[in-house]
Amino acid sequence: MQQKKVEQLLKQHDIKPSYHRIKILSYLLEKKNHPTADMIYQELVKEIPTLSKTTVYNTLNLFVEKNVAIIITIDENETRYDADISLHGHFKCSSCGKIYDIRLNTAGIIPDELEKFQIDESHIYFKGTCPLCLKKALS
């Protein structure tokens, strides 16, 4: 995504578009690998030697607070981030660890019992083995 578009997205969410914030959001938008904060740090520190883990964590927390990114916690001991804030699910392969976005048919997904509730978050996760790993296992 172009830097100008990332800057505009940050401004739309009342976030000052600093160099580090632009780079972190660009990473989330381009890679779509549902990274941990450490994965983002390890990748970006090669390009930005002055980047600190604290900056990455603080920036990600700000993105979540301002609804620019969401937290994915498929496993209790691992926090990952996603810049796709639309309603969708995730599938984590227990073999390779890759996380896939799952598009959902949202019609009828919310039970009638929640009709009068305000839903602020939803999490739909699946775990299993992805097609690539299944194919490798059969080879």
Image (spheres, rainbow, N blue to C red):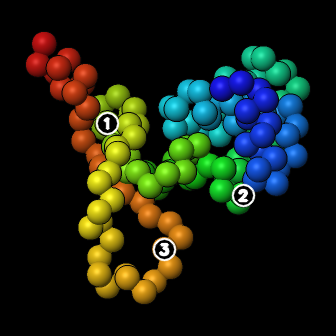
Per the image, the residue denoted by label 1 is 93
Graded by Cα atoms within 10 Å as few (under 14), some (14 to 19) or many (20 or more), the crowding at tag 3 reads few
Position of 81 compared to 138: left or right?
right
Mark 3 or 2 closer to N-term? 2
Q: Which of marks 3 and 1 is in front?
A: 3
Location of residue 47 with respect to 122 vertically, above or below: above
Q: Residue 66 carries which label?
A: 2
Label 1 or label 2, whichever lies nearer to me, is: 2
Q: Position of residue 5 (x, y in %)?
A: 73, 33
Contact between marks 3 and 1 (CB within 8 A): the answer is no
The amino acid marked with disc number 2 is Lys
Instruction: Examine the rendering and report whether any part of residue 125 can be seen.
Output: no
Q: Is residue 126 visible?
A: yes
Residue shown at 56%/36% (left/top)? 35
Q: Residue furthest top?
A: 139
Name the disc covering residue 119, or none.
3
Categorize mark 1 by other alpha carbons within 10 Å: few (<14), some (14-19), many (20+).
Answer: some
Identify the mark nearer the N-term, 3 or 1: 1
Left/right placement of residue 99 relative to residue 138 reads right
Q: Viewer-proximal residue, 32 or 133?
A: 32
